[in-house]
Amino acid sequence: MQHLLRRKITYIIIAFLYCQTGNAQLRDGINLPDHDSKLYHFGINLGLNQSHFSFTHHSQFLNGAVNDSIAAIESMNNTGINLAWLVNLNLSEHWDLRAYPLNLTFTEKAFEYRMYKYDPFLNEGPLTIKKVQGITLSFPLLLKFSSDRIGNMKVFTTGGGRIDYDLASNANKKNAEELIKTKALDYSIEAGIGFHIYFPYFVMTPELRVNWGLANLHQRNPNLRFSSNVDQINSRMISLSLTVE
């Protein structure tokens, strides 16, 4: 139900923006005709993200060794938010370099364990969830290719890389023995698609981006059952954002 509600709200917003753009075009013609020829411009970005862990099972889990309590492990999707400041550098008519020197991403990923044996006094049950919350300072650097402008709209695609540092990483915490410990530093590749909507005084940019983490984030502890049965962990995220430029 929430998924359908979010989809309806998104459609309503896009339809409203499209109508507003058409009305402005009829009244005033082409909005901000010199916007894309500027050497650089700035923007504020706000978005929602859906993130999870891509992981592999450790060989001891696959072989059934030292595994008398966990039947299955799954990664769960969770929703977060991201806030960013955009700097756009114009390279040519169709190419731009987009950087986000201040980008905060709030996420909550989780593992779900199906348990043979569990201890209710340790907040365990037949389905036990271990959450990994993140407050990530990110630096995405993206190359943008855009189409010709059609009235007050333009379509574009982006691709590039990103470096993340998790300010909430628990890898070095001594009191987190029952949690999945993750490292602070991550690097990833990123791709997206979006479109610019030109208003009389600003440009609004809805954008969809997908992020694939490349680094193994798992600080594995072979003596802990929630950690020992998991081998490599990589981050995955998809985000829908709105930028005012």
Image (cartoon, rainbow, N blue to C red):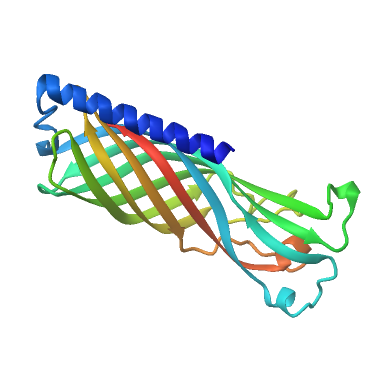
| Closer-to-camera residue (183/144) | 144
Q: Give coordinates of residue 99: x percent, y percent.
A: 29, 44
Which residue shows up at 67% across the image and 48% down it?
Answer: 131
Residue 134 place in picture, x, y as percent:
57, 45
The vertical placement of 23 against 106, above or below, is above
| Quarter occupied by residue 26 | top left
Quadrant (top left/top right/bottom left/bottom right) for the N terminus = top right
**x, y percent for residue 63:** 74, 80
> What is the quadrant of residue 47 in the picture?
top left
Horizontal relation, residue 32 to residue 13: left or right: left
Residue 155 left/right relative to 184:
left
Q: Position of residue 36 (x, y in %)?
A: 13, 38
Residue 139 appears anywhere in the view: yes
| Residue in front for this viewpoint, 27 or 30 | 27
Residue lying farthest bottom? 63
- Give the residue drawn at x 14%, y 40%: 150
Q: Residue at x 71, y 55 (%)?
A: 112
Q: Nearer the viewer, residue 86 or 243?
A: 243
